[in-house]
Image: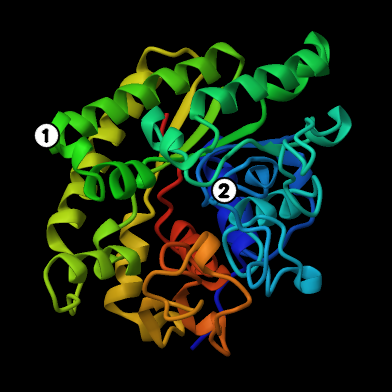
Amino acid sequence: MAPMPTLAASFLLGILLLFYPAAGAAVHHSVTATTGLSAYDIPAVFAFGDSTLDTGNNNALPTAVRADHAPYGREFPGGAPTGRFSDGKLLTDFVVEALGIKELLPAYRSGSGAGLAVDAAATGVCFASGGSGLDDATAANAGVATFASQLDDFRELLGRMGGSKASQVVGKAAFLVSAGTNDMMMNYYMLPSGRSKYTLEQYHDLLIGNLRSHIQSMYDLGARRILVAGLPPVGCLPLQLTLAALRQPPRPDGCIKEQNAAAESYNGKLQRMLAGFQSVSPGARAVYADIYSPLLDMVDHPGKYGFSEVTKGCCGSGLMEMGPLCTDLVPTCAKPSEFMFWDSVHPTQATYRAVADHFLRSNILRFDN
């Protein structure tokens, strides 16, 4: 198999195409080049949402939804667990490194719970909290930070930065958002209370409405470059397949079609919401990031990505383990790079790399004026 472009360069090119459409021709010839990227003037990256972006904020919370223990971080520099829900770096780490900002995107809340020093946070920081979502009930059930509280942390940082410094950074920074998967998995499909209160379409509308409000808050605080990830093919996640088997054995051979169809419906509504938001928000560039298509393609054609296993995670049995159940007391696979999932929900570093390659090849992050 031909080597894939690095995650950092691929996703970075997507960002450049998003914020600077004319840059496509200039950088397309060398997707792995990282020199001279500071010329595109992206001074910081701010991340909000759930465990796909959380680089360690939950370490400071009294919650079981944590990844600050082995075997998480097995492929991370030094092999140390940091609170990232994967075997290695997350997407945002590669982005800030390729931009020449810094090597890793730090969590805003350290283990002590204190906010990161201003000088370090002003060049980008992660506010995301694993287990969080767009419905506050999701975060409350997990004992983690709500999306609104993540925005409160951002406001706190802006106050500490001061008006002059904040205005220089925020308007040009990239704001990355990934949320909604936990709402569907943990608060709708798993708990009967969610389904008893809302139909599927009503719950989608609730989530999209809440997200619209949060994006508006970002915009009001100065954000202009906002990238929002859609839902993945939820019905292909190992945990969802296992839960389906517990309800009605045996475990499905393929993905759960109804849950994937629901994710596609949500993503359609998300795209329409972002287009509407941008049309009434001067200077805003609000772009939908499709993660559904590349992840489903990995499930359907694993060999194309170098994967030998796409139905279970690398940690333990791969069927249920995640967070507190994925520990150094359970075995892990020999080659995480051949697994699509690290635990029963979260991708491996190899999966993030392949998703970024899809972003590049399809130009889905290109911004159209």
For label 2, count other residues whose C-alpha is less than 10 Å away and answer few (under 14), some (14-19) or many (20+): many
Q: Is residue 134 above or below residue 95?
A: above
The picture places residue 81, in percent across and down from the top left corner, at 71, 64
Depth check, mark 1 against mark 2: the one in front is: 1
Can the viewer see residue 176?
A: yes
The residues bearing labels 1 and 2 have C-alpha atoms spaced at a distance of 29 Å
The 10 Å Cα crowd at callout 1, few under 14, some 14 to 19, many 20 or more, is few
Of the pair 63 and 138, the residue shown nearer to us: 63
Q: Position of residue 340 (x, y in %)?
A: 44, 74
Q: Is residue 255 visible?
A: no
Quarter holding the C terminus is top left
Residue hosting label 1? 199
The residue pinned by badge 2 equals 53
Amino acid type at image mark 1: Thr
In the displayed structure image, the side of residue 312 where residue 115 appears, left or right: right
Amino acid at pointer 2: Leu
Residue for point 23% across, 34% down: 204
Counting residues from the start of the chain, the first of labels 1 and 2 encountered is: 2
- Left or right position of 177 against 103: left
Instruction: Please identify the quarter of the rendering in which residue 114 is found.
Output: top right
Q: Are marks 1 and 2 in contact (CB under 8 Å)?
A: no
- Which residue sits at x=57%, y=59%? 85
Mark 2 residue element = loop
As drawn, is 185 to the left or to the right of 97? left
Q: Position of residue 270 (x, y in %)?
A: 30, 34
In the image, 106: left or right of 187?
right
In this view, 362 is above or below 216: below
Residue name at image x 67 percent, y 27 percent: 172
